Image (cartoon, rainbow, N blue to C red):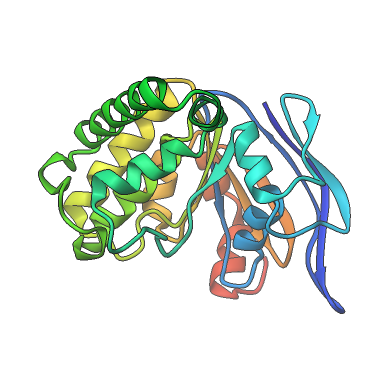
Amino acid sequence: MLQVNDIHVSFGTLHVLRGISFGASAGEILGIIGPNGAGKSTLFSAITGFHRPRQGSVLLDGENLKRLRPDQVAGKGLVRTFQVPREFGHMTVLENLMVAGSSRAADTITTGLFGGRKLAESEGRLKERALAMLERLNLMHVASNPAKALSGGQKKLLELGRTLMVEPKVLLVDEPFAGVAPALRDLLVGHLRALRDEGLCLLIVEHDIEAIMQLSDRICVLVDGVILIDGTPAEVQADRRVLDAYLGAVSA
């Protein structure tokens, strides 16, 4: 489904990513870990069009997305969240989901061509989808609250819901557990697993090593802009180089 081939990203003379290649399939969670400065967030930005790689390609179902803008990449079904949720603070939680869903091409075309009754029907379907998403994410009780009033964990759930309203094929999730209380963290883990089981392809960057080891089917360890190891959680945990990368220990 997703294939990343030989991605290089540089900022001036600083080489942040140096030949990154991996694949990810439908119904799989690929964890991406590494010490600070390894290039994890830059990798997400390169995959989703926010940074233009100087070399390499990103393929979704065989289609090269390298030259597309971020909104065009999202339109193809490759969507990301951010470390800091980017909600519309003065809108309600329900409105945030509806705005995200209205960006779909089908809604835009229907609105532009027909208006009137067709527009009302489209908005009705959109509201139904948004309400179903609130129910799924256990946010129905805050549907009418301004998004800025949510807790950190609730904002993470809303961010997840906003991306799901776009109906992605591949979802890149950037540090979903950062600043989240344990109860909501467990809730997020359950939602991510459920999405995987429904056939979504997920890439997750996370510093919570225990959580990512339990959640991922495979893990890529990124160090100094290159992939140190790509394997199962058990294989990664058994590799001494991973410990060295995190703790700065001298390799045996």
Image quadrant containing the N terminus:
top right
Where residue 8 appears, x then y in whole percent?
A: 83, 58
Query: Which residue is drawn at the image coordinates 50% and 39% (left, top)?
Result: 103
Report whether 3 appears left or right of 161. Answer: right
Q: Quadrant of the C terminus?
A: bottom right
> Which residue is rendered at x = 37% and y = 50% of the image?
159
The quadrant in which residue 54 appears is bottom right
- Residue sitting farthest toward the front: 116
User: Going by the image, does 235 lie left or right of 183?
Assistant: right
Name the residue rendered at 57%, 47% in the picture.
Answer: 236
208 or 126: nearer the viewer:
126
Q: Quadrant of residue 112?
A: top right
Left/right of residue 165 with respect to residue 36 in the rendered view: left
Which one is in front, 207 or 127? 127
Relative to 177, residue 135 above or below: above
Asked whether, in this view, residue 171 is left or right of residue 137, the answer is right
Residue at the left extreme?
141
- Is 29 situated above or below 177? above
In the figure, residue 76 lies in which quadrant?
Answer: top right
Q: Position of residue 238 (x, y in %)?
A: 55, 48
Give coordinates of residue 23: x percent, y percent. 70, 34
Q: Which residue sits furthest bottom?
A: 13
Percent from the top left, x then y, of residue 84? 42, 65
Front-lying residue, 59 or 74 = 74
Towards the viewer: 124 or 31? 124
Q: Is residue 61 above or below residue 42?
A: above
- What residue sits 23% from the left and 32% below the top? 131
Number of labelled discs?
0
Instruction: Give above or below for 181 relative to 62.
Output: below
